[in-house]
Image (cartoon, rainbow, N blue to C red):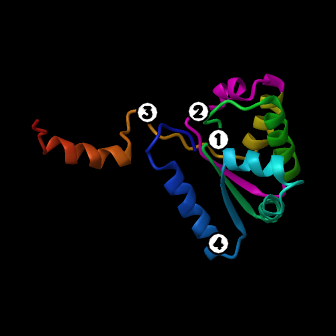
Amino acid sequence: MMGPTGVGKTHLSTALGIHAIERGYQVSFISMDRLIYVLKSREYISKSKTRYNRIIKSDLIIIDDVMYMAYEPQDAHLFFQFIYEMYDKAAFILTSNKGPGEWGKFLGDTTLTTAILDRLLHRSEILTFSEEQDSIRMKYRKALFNNQSVES
């Protein structure tokens, strides 16, 4: 799922995850930065190892905020190894503010990015949320502030 901040990507992915759980599937939800942390620390921290083992046993893995920030080369390699390992073993839902064409600059390696996208986009559906759509969060905030004036 791709689109600007606040349009409901995380909300929809969570709803789909709940739907899958209700049908008996094992689901993991994790942000991209947390996933990288778990991948980096699973050999040293028992909590990370437990979380990693739970993730790799999942039927559906939801990764939120993919490519939200730039990653170190070793982080990009860990992400590739994770996708490589889970390819054909689990379904993925990814949410991102960036299109696949922009991922290379966040991972720093176009060959690695191509390999990741090749696996992720194979047999996938891409949902793109409109750039013109306003943030759901800010929509209600604007209504609050438009009706009030601030006096000194």
Q: Which residue is mark 3?
A: 131
Q: Which numbered disc, 2 or 3, marks the residue that appears first in the sequence?
A: 2
Q: Mark 3 touching mark 1, by CB under 8 A?
A: no
- What is the secondary structure assignment of the residue under circle 1? loop
Residue, x 58% and y 44% (percent of image)?
1
Q: Which residue is mark 2?
A: 98
Q: Mark 2 touching mark 1, by CB under 8 A?
A: yes
Q: Which numbered disc, 2 or 4, marks the residue that appears first in the sequence?
A: 4
Q: Amino acid at mark 3?
A: Glu
Question: Magenta segment range?
Answer: 87-111
- What is the secondary structure assignment of the residue under circle 3? loop
Q: Which residue is mark 4?
A: 21
The residue closer to the viewer here, 101 or 104, is 104
Q: Mark 2 touching mark 4, by CB under 8 A?
A: no
Q: Which numbered disc, 2 or 1, marks the residue that appears first in the sequence?
A: 1
Residue, x 63% and y 33% (percent of image)?
69
Residue, x 53% and y 40% (percent of image)?
128
Q: What is the total number of numbered labels drawn onto the structure image? A: 4
Q: CA distance from mark 3 to mark 1?
A: 18 Å
The residue closer to the viewer here, 41 or 111, is 41
Residue 88 located left or right of residue 125: right
Residue 131, x across and y down, in percent: 43, 33
- What is the secondary structure assignment of the residue under circle 2? loop
Q: Amino acid at mark 2?
A: Lys
Q: CA distance from mark 2 to mark 4?
A: 28 Å
Q: Which numbered disc, 3 or 1, marks the residue that appears first in the sequence?
A: 1
How dense is the environment of label 1, judged by Cα within 10 Å: few (below 14), some, or many (20 and up)?
Answer: many
- What is the secondary structure assignment of the residue under circle 4? helix
Q: Which residue is mark 1?
A: 66
The image shows residue 13, relative to residue 77, as above or below, that is below
